[in-house]
Amino acid sequence: MPADTIIPWAFMIWKTCIPPSHSFIFWPLIHGKMPIDENLCVRGCIIVLVCNFWLETDETSEHLFLRCPFVADLWNWLGMDLTSF
């Protein structure tokens, strides 16, 4: 990717009000590089695909950060509305 290419969602995670450590978590997540079960299986690791919080569904990026009932409760507690995602 050329250095001058503008990534439309990058402005959402690289802000002065967001600690860089948090932005560095979302960067690999958005690029599909987060070492979660779905990505580890693609790379040839043999593991059980299950959410460690809910134990009923596969651990995917979407489930782990948006759909898991445990995480949804956490987002609701923080006042975030996940219906737009």
Image (cartoon, rainbow, N blue to C red):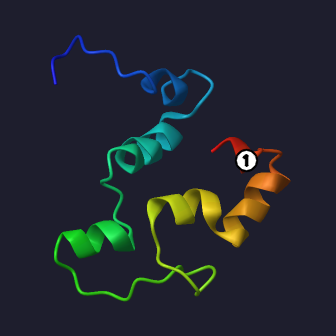
Of the 4 image quadrants, the one containing the C terminus is top right
Q: Residue at x 32, y 45 (%)?
A: 31
Answer left or right for 67 relative to 13. right
Residue 12 position, x and y percent, is: 54, 26
At label 1, counting other C-alpha atoms closer than 10 Å, the crowd grade (few under 14, some 14-19, many 20 or more) is few
Up-down: is 52 above or below 24?
below
Answer left or right for 11 relative to 40. right
Residue 81 position, x and y percent, is: 77, 45
Answer left or right for 34 relative to 40. right
Residue 77 position, x and y percent, is: 84, 55
Name the foreground residue: 66 vs 33.
66
Q: Secondary structure at mark 1?
A: helix
Question: For residue 66, which quarter of the picture?
Answer: bottom right
Of the 4 image quadrants, the one containing the N terminus is top left
The amino acid on which the numbered mark 1 sits, given as a three-letter code, is Thr
Q: How many marks?
A: 1
Q: Residue at x 81, y 54 (%)?
A: 76
Q: Residue at x 48, y 26 (%)?
A: 14
Looking at this view, name the residue that lies furthest to the top. Answer: 4
Residue labelled with disc 1: 83
Answer left or right for 4 relative to 54. left
Q: Residue at x 55, y 65 (%)?
A: 63
